[in-house]
Image (tube, grey):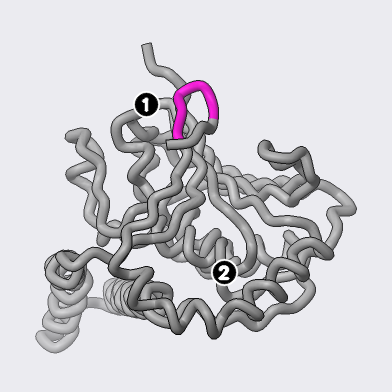
Amino acid sequence: MSQSAQFTSTGTVKHAGTEPMDMVACVMHELRTPITAILAAGENIRDGRLDKNDLREEGVLIIAEAMRLMNLGDQILLYAKAGRSGLRREVRTLTAGEVIGHAVNGASIHLQQAGFTLEQEIQPDLPPLRGDLSLLSRCLHNLITNGVKYSGQSRWLGVSALIGERSRDGQEEIQISVRDRGLGISAEDLPHVFEPFYRGHSPAVSKIHGTGLGLSIAKSCAEACGGTISVVSTEGSGCSFNLHLPLHGELAAQLANQEGDAEKGRALLWEHEQTPNHLSRYDHNGPSSI
């Protein structure tokens, strides 16, 4: 019988020495599919094999694959920035609905192509939050596209926003969740899902293409805005990825402290990169220290 497992990512994303080759291999593999599709469409158009309707379909395909390439480039740049100089923020007052809307719009082509139903539920009168719209929407975008990729036969995703309490101190926070009814994550894989380039070991998951960067980047984007990400999953029954954001005043203070420590952090960057820092919490019955 499957057990529900929970993982909260609180450590620093590691950039190990072997990762450049991992990145090259993953990126080259991911480039082949869209490039092959674009080449095939171009040859069909060049050779005059298509009628008017087919031309439109090929145009849609070319646009979709080009956007896939652009997204891959964006992911790689974000990963590089997170590992070297940190992600830059343009902090302003936001609403949860604004962040969700921006992320859903960005992922709409993935949802439409895969035939997904997306249900949204936003608690009325949520207080504002402070953060970077681009980073927070990228975080949610990656969680949504991850749900699309690993949903198996299911074609449903749920996105919700509500007020919750932090498990460590009971303080109020805004929780934005992305839920699916797909493959789920095994207890073995769960502690590693936010590690760069990590791929699950189950046969069903190993067949799915990807760089293994999406969740790592989502984590970096959340932390750049003072938040954290947790995941609860039952293997075979789906996942709930949860973005936890402190409320307006507290987040503003956190971001101010982060900016004050920025120069010190950059000066110590080399030492930090040479010393692995793993502070993730994992327990089948709830969060615990490891």
Which label's residue is closer to the chain start, 1 or 2?
2
Q: Which residues are magenta?
A: 282-286
- The single residue placed furthest to the right in the displayed view is 125
Q: Nearer the viewer, residue 213 or 167?
A: 167
Name the residue: 21% across, 34% down. 202
Q: Name the chief secondary structure element in magenta.
A: loop
In the image, residue 192 above or below residue 145 = above
Res 83 quadrant in image: bottom left
Q: Which residue is mark 1?
A: 236
In the image, residue 242 above or below residue 98 = above
* Residue 135 on image: x %, y %: 56, 72
Within 10 Å of disc 2 (Cα), the crowding (few <14, some 14-19, many 20+) is: many
How many tags in the picture?
Answer: 2
Q: Nearer the viewer, residue 131 or 138?
A: 131
Residue 65 left/right relative to 224: left
Name the residue: 45% across, 83% down. 267
Q: Amino acid at mark 2?
A: Ala
Q: Dividing the image into 4 quarters, which one contains the C terminus?
A: top left
Name the residue: 32% across, 58% down. 276
Asked if residue 178 lies in the magenta stretch, the reply is no
Name the residue: 67% across, 39% down. 168
Res 286 quadrant in image: top right
Q: Amino acid at mark 1?
A: Gly
Residue 210 left/right relative to 155: left
As helix, strand or loop, the secondary structure at mark 2 comes to helix
Pointers 1 and 2 in contact (CB under 8 A)? no
Residue 231 left/right relative to 92: left
Asked if residue 283 lies in the magenta stretch, the reply is yes
Q: Dividing the image into 4 quarters, which one contains the N terminus?
A: top left
Q: Which residue is mark 2?
A: 224
